[in-house]
Image (cartoon, coloured by chain):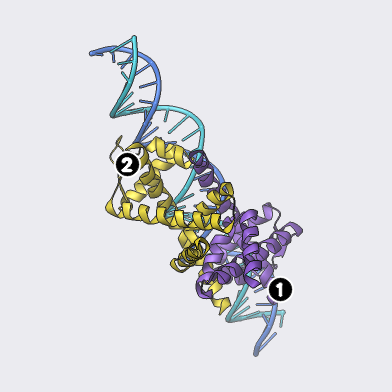
Chain colours: A purple, B yellow, C blue, D cyan
Amino acid sequence: MTRRSSIDSYRKTRVDHASETAEDYVEAIDELIEQEGQCRVTTLARRLGISHVTVSRTLSRLASEDLVETEPYRPIVLTDKGHALAAWARQRHELVLNFLKALGVPENVAIPDAEGMEHHCSPKTLSAMKRFLKETRS
Amino acid sequence: MTRRSSIDSYRKTRVDHASETAEDYVEAIDELIEQEGQCRVTTLARRLGISHVTVSRTLSRLASEDLVETEPYRPIVLTDKGHALAAWARQRHELVLNFLKALGVPENVAIPDAEGMEHHCSPKTLSAMKRFLKETRS
DNA sequence: CATTTAATGTAGCATAGGCTACAAATGGAG
DNA sequence: CTCCATTTGTAGCCTATGCTACATTAAATG
């Protein structure tokens, strides 16, 4: 039983990874729009720490997935779907980060760890984290 | 400050991913050797849920990184370095899984989540998990 | 020991995500 | 309005990870 599910676990991890990029992008785009009024390719590239070329190509994929809308030389816009995903990702990000901090992980470590872990937390794990935060606060 | 580290966080997540495959492979190889006395390409492929072709190619890379030794049509052997990495990965895997279960995450969810999360837990986060387990047990 | 079956390797293709170098568009300063 | 700096796009290359189809080796069985 544990044997059987190991295959599925590995597969899930792989599939998760496919959507991680999308989540990171829409989350960063959403933040940039909030912070600067708009999101440009170059700004996003700086934020993600990669070249504008990679960002540009990835945005094409996200556009084909109906998460963003792009016009040549224009700011990047989130679709409703993209915005919803961003909101969800940001919320989850906050939760995981707060959870790690409440667990006693120093912030400078919790930030990068949360970044990597958040994509792999299923709803039930997120609920457990919420529960922990509630109990800890009281 | 949080701004500055966001770039590094994204970068760290990407770099982490590069070593995830290696960790998953040596961990699975180590388990198979323990369970079946040897590890064959096909068995490993089944375990990881991917084709033997992909496994074969990835093993070449791991061999070039001195983690495994391969001979054509022969079982896969872990180098000392590979075995050490496997031991570390298995230990970390156990810890994360036990932590999630102690947190109240159902096992069937904890297994795949641990699989994805473990690669992103830095030593300080692992320490915090250990601490939590100790406190919970008492 | 020949033959079939299973395991492994190889060829070749696809996608995702990196990059540099160069071209073209935009926008602001003079 | 022209020109220059910045931004964005395009061409082309790389690695990692997936695959199917086919070739080859090893092993098992009659």
Q: Across the whole image, how many numbered discs are drawn on residues? A: 2
Question: Does dot 2 land on a helix, a strand or a loop?
Answer: loop
Quarter where residue B70 is shown: top left
Q: Residue at x 46, y 62 (%)?
A: B15
Q: State the mark number for residue B76.
A: 2
Task: For residue A39, say whether it is visible.
Answer: no
Q: In the figure, is residue B75 to the left or right of B8?
A: left
Q: Residue at x 41, y 52 (%)?
A: B90
Quarter where residue A47 is shown: bottom right
Question: Does dot 1 land on a helix, a strand or a loop?
Answer: helix
Q: Amino acid at mark 1?
A: Glu
Q: Position of residue B123 (x, y in %)?
A: 43, 66
For the residues labelled 2 and 1, say whether their Cβ atoms are less than 8 Å apart. no
The one of A29 and A76 positioned closer to us in this rendering: A29
Gap in angstroms between the C-alphas marked 2 and 1:
52 Å
Q: Would you name the residue on which mark 1 appears? A: A34
Q: Residue furthest right?
A: A80
- Foreground mark, 2 or 1? 2
Q: Position of residue A32 (x, y in %)?
A: 66, 72
Q: In the figure, is residue B36 to the left or right of B98?
A: left
The one of A35 and A64 positioned closer to us in this rendering: A35
The one of B13 and A61 positioned closer to us in this rendering: B13
